Image (cartoon, grey):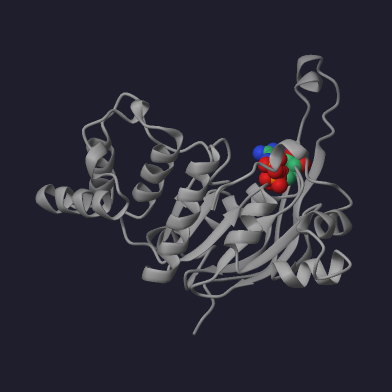
Amino acid sequence: MPAAIRTSGLTRTFHITSPMSRAFRLPRTPRTVEAVRGIDLTVEQGEILGFLGPNGAGKTTTLRMLTTLLPPTSGTATVAGRDLRTDPRGVRRRIGYVAQSGGTDPAVRVREELTTQARLYRLAGSAAGRRTRELAADLDLTGLLDRPCGALSGGQRRRLDIAMALTHDPELLFLDEPTTGLDPGSRAEVWRLVRRLRDERGVTVFLTTHYLDEADALADRLVIVADGRIAAQGSSAELRRDYGGSAEAGLQEAFLAVTGRPVPREEQAPVAV
Ligand SMILES: Nc1ncnc2c1ncn2[C@@H]1O[C@H](COP(=O)(O)OP(=O)(O)OP(=O)(O)O)[C@@H](O)[C@H]1O
């Protein structure tokens, strides 16, 4: 079975020219930021992969490259069986992406958002309506179809974001910090949904998160990035054993040992499972 994602030497460098140098007509010496420095990564089909790291480690930049939103500076990647550089449209057809900020308009009704999304994927008339009803039933949104998106709770809105990303039945789903800002009950609801998508539909899930408890509970395998490189990878138990000092150690200890940086306390929200 081919891997869902395979990257080799994936790299992204940004060159930044200070606006001050422009304003004062100073010589332009662009600063170089090596956001991602040669990532070799394999994600198996049907796997839930947790992509972790401190602020600025390169998580979002990697995710944006893998979803075709940002071209790599160098390196290669195959995503959902398609080459990222030569067939980005093929990649986009096979993946779903839920951005951290979501993508719904507060003034628009849930039904309209889902139907518009279906039309974007070239489903016409009754087929778009049918897909809307299917997704709503599947993601427990049927009772909310006539509500404006702005009237949904945080957890309901996240469910709608995920429903929209599933419109074209993707085999691979990218979630950027899917539970940031949600209360414990809504976080648990999103976790159950992600598990169900994998268990019942075989969807591969690539998720970035700041929450170690989320990574621990949800992901089959964790990849910790630091300074644009993969610093460690394995199951939660393996990381705790190999870096945390013992199998009883918390993921916090392992994360600290790998990255040299603790996860800020406010980012470790409790959750009811
Ligand atoms: N468009 C850009 N232009 C310049 N530098 C950028 C750009 N995007 C990201 N960077 C820099 O690249 C590095 C990695 O950023 P990235 O957003 O990928 O990190 P992250 O791990 O997602 O961080 P966070 O957890 O804070 O979201 C950072 O130093 C960031 O400032």
Residue 14 in view here: no
Residue 233 vertical placement versus 60 (above, below): below
Residue 241 in view here: yes
* Image quarter where ligand 1 lies: top right
Q: Give the tally of numbered discs.
A: 0
The answer to which quarter of the image holds residue 22 is top right
Q: Residue at x 67, y 69 (%)?
A: 41
Q: Residue furthest top?
A: 24
Q: Residue at x 70, y 40 (%)?
A: 267
Q: Which of 241 and 224 lies nearest the eye of the viewer?
A: 241
Q: Position of residue 154 (x, y in %)?
A: 45, 35
Q: Residue at x 23, y 36 (%)?
A: 112
Residue 159 vertical placement versus 110 (above, below): below
Q: Position of residue 111 (x, y in %)?
A: 22, 38
Q: Position of residue 23 (x, y in %)?
A: 76, 15
Q: Position of residue 151 (x, y in %)?
A: 34, 26
Q: Which of 269 and 175 lies nearest the eye of the viewer?
A: 269
Q: Residue at x 45, y 49 (%)?
A: 189
Residue 247 vertical placement versus 212 (above, below): below
Q: Which of 56 and 106 lies nearest the eye of the viewer?
A: 106
Q: Residue furthest bottom?
A: 1
Residue 182 vertical placement versus 74 (above, below): above
